[in-house]
Amino acid sequence: MIIRRALLLLAPFAILLQLPGKNDPAAYVRMEVSAGGSRALQTAWRLMQPPKGSGKPAIWLVGVSHIGQKSYYEKTQRKLDAVDLVLFEGVGFDGNATARIKERDSSVSDLQTTLADSLGLVFQLDAIRYDRKHFRNSDLGVAELQAKLGGSGSKPKPGQKGGDPEVRNFVKMLEGGSFALTLAQGILKLFQGNPQFQAMARLAIIEAIAASEGDVSKLAGAASPGMQQLFKTLIDDRNAVVVRDVRKAILAEEPPASIAVFYGAGHMIDLETRLREELDYRSAEETWLTAFSVNPRKAGLSDFEVNFVGRLIRAQIAKLRKPAKSGKPKNR
């Protein structure tokens, strides 16, 4: 149960979503294992080219992990600075310093910063400069997101039946009112600076992402239908905003020569699918970057511990993939 809740806690980081089907785009995340046993979490940049002669701009889908090594974000920044227009993720965040501080101080961002610190990494909002002139927010507004979350997770009015309790608890966590969120932050801070904890935590995150095959929806697979729908809505509705903004840029009087969509890697398979089906773009090339890595042996973890973590994560992912049981229990 503890491991299951820990895996569900990873969902707000929105690192990964969508399992590629037969004709779907390839994943934007992977685990690389070296000959020496090191594990690395890698994310992809994928170039999308328009039909020849269309005059449309090339589009880079820059999938990102919200926590990573400083060098990872330095390379990402250089990529973003090299294009004409960047459409970036951030609910109600326009990229200026004041907005960045407010976003960074939000409950989930605070947890991500604490997680990054405890793992010896950095948080995306602290590492990327969003105040560039060619950066443009492409996301839902705060009121829009609150309305969508409120529709699924708000408290019932007097006389009404309660909504989905899992959804309400998730919304409460996002709003900073969750005891579990506070407890998680406290535990992470307690282990800051512990090399073995850092290694074990990095290993667990990388293994969880690999075992889920880049599909965070699996982490909610055994949850209620309301929770599954909430995760889907948060991806679909926000991606629709991005495609709308891409269309606007393409149809502008002076369209940019190149565009980068800078979003969590979990959004990218759906975004690539939309660009293919709605705008006739096709993938042309890709680049893989290491967000962060771990060398278990160097950190003092035994082969038994490494294998135990892998087996445990895979077993929990398998349980989470099973659909939630419905109906009344049978009498014994």
Image (cartoon, rainbow, N blue to C red):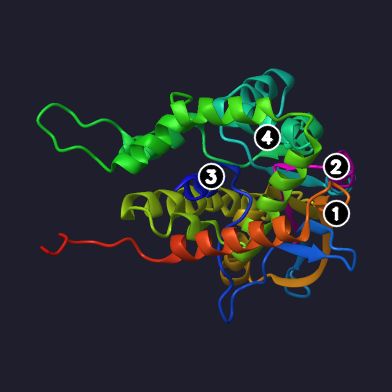
Query: Element at badge 1?
Result: loop
Q: Which residue bears the numbered disc 1?
A: 297
Q: Does dot 2 land on a helix, a strand or a loop?
A: helix
- Going from N to C along the chain, the mark reached first, 1 or 3, is 3
Q: Which residues are magenta?
A: 56-76
Residue at x 85% of width, y 42% of height:
77
| Viewer-side label of 3, 4 | 3
For residue 77, the mark is 2
Placement of 24 over or under 12, stated as above or below: below
Above or below, 293 relative to 118: below
Residue 247 highlighted magenta (yes or no):
no
Looking at the rendered structure, the kind of residue marked 4 is Leu
| Residue highlighted by disc 3 | 6
Q: Between tags 3 and 2, which lies in front? A: 3
Mark 4 and mark 2 residues within 8 Å of each other at the beta carbon: no
Q: Quadrant of the C terminus?
A: bottom left
Q: Would residue 69 be visible to someone looking at this image?
A: yes
**Amino acid marked by disc 3:** Ala
Q: Residue at x 76, y 52 (%)?
A: 259
* Mark 1 burial class by Cα count in 10 Å: few <14, some 14-19, many 20+: some
Q: Nearer the viewer, residue 69 or 131?
A: 69
Quadrant housing residue 116: top right
